[in-house]
Amino acid sequence: MDEVLADWKTAVIPERTRAALRLLECLTLRPMELDNAFVQGLRSDILDDHAIRAAANVSFHFNMMNRMADAFEFETLNARQEAFHTKMLNRSGRFVNGKQANPVWVRDDDGQIRPTELAKARKPLLTAPGKTSPELREAVEAFVVQQRGHTRPQTQPIPDELTRYLTKLALYAYKITDKDMDALRTAGYGDEAIYEITIAGAYGAALVGIEKLFDILYG
């Protein structure tokens, strides 16, 4: 494991594992570079569509939760906690192995192809009643997606006081500080509103790679 964390590109690991890590890196850092040639390269390394979707699912949750953690300063796990959570995640993976949505993808209301479960979760995330309006949450998602280089119609302008925060959330969430949160509160956003804005933006940022990949696989 230490060898992989140090440099997965040179670590002694199965090529199938290296291919999955290559996909994870691309989805996280350069999602708009995904193309047919990249996906065919994964398949030549014996990754079938099920494995590609599984890696993409890991990437989605990492990209979303990592931004949430940066924004809200989640506590870093110690070694014992990391070992426990890794064990539980592995066990959960064995329990649900082979269980997947049917169909595995849908063309959503906006025309984007997404995993079925993510499309189902996206709708209430953006439209359910909350401290912020559905229109604002949809605009937040669109803004963050655009910052990541993908296309999404901008339903309404983003308020100026949110632009700096959402740009950080999209591109370098690790730079979010207490000053950013204080600025939002000064502008009149309460903690619940900040949470709703953040989760809408983080969800959108994480969707970019998934949408690009699923368009290649099923578009």
Image (cartoon, rainbow, N blue to C red):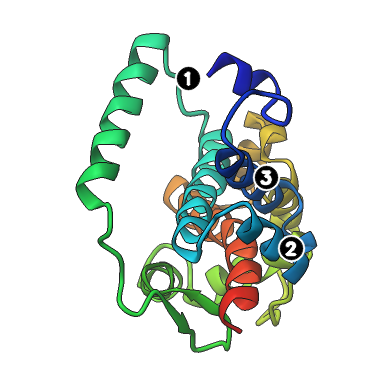
Residue drawn at x 53%, y 19% as measured from the top left = 1
* Percent of width and height locating residue 199: 49, 54
Type of residue at label 1?
A: Thr
Disc 1 marks which residue? 76
Specify few, some or many for label 2: CA neighbours under 10 Å numbering under 14, 14-19, or 20 or more.
some
- Residue 1's place in the image compared with 211, above or below, is above
* Percent of width and height locating residue 77: 42, 18
Q: Earlier in the sequence, mark 2 or mark 1?
A: 2
Type of residue at label 2?
A: Leu
* Percent of width and height locating residue 170: 69, 52
Kindly indicate the quadrant of the structure image that contains residue 159: bottom right
* Percent of width and height locating residue 4: 61, 23
Q: Earlier in the sequence, mark 3 or mark 2?
A: 3
Residue drawn at x 67%, y 28% as measured from the top left = 8
Residue drawn at x 66%, y 69% as measured from the top left = 212
Q: Judging from the image, what secondary structure is the residue with disc 2 in?
A: loop
3D distance between C-alphas at marks 1 and 3: 25 Å
Kindly indicate the quadrant of the structure image that contains residue 118: bottom left
Q: Judging from the image, what secondary structure is the residue with disc 3 in?
A: helix
Kindly indicate the quadrant of the structure image that contains residue 92: top left
Does the residue at mark 2 contact the one at mark 1 (Cβ under 8 Å)? no
Judging depth in this view, the residue of 65 and 100 nearest the camera is 100
Disc 3 marks which residue? 22
Q: Is residue 14 left or right of residue 176?
A: left
The C terminus: image quadrant: bottom right
Does the residue at mark 3 contact the one at mark 2 (Cβ under 8 Å)? no
- Residue 83's place in the image compared with 198, above or below, is above
Disc 2 marks which residue? 34
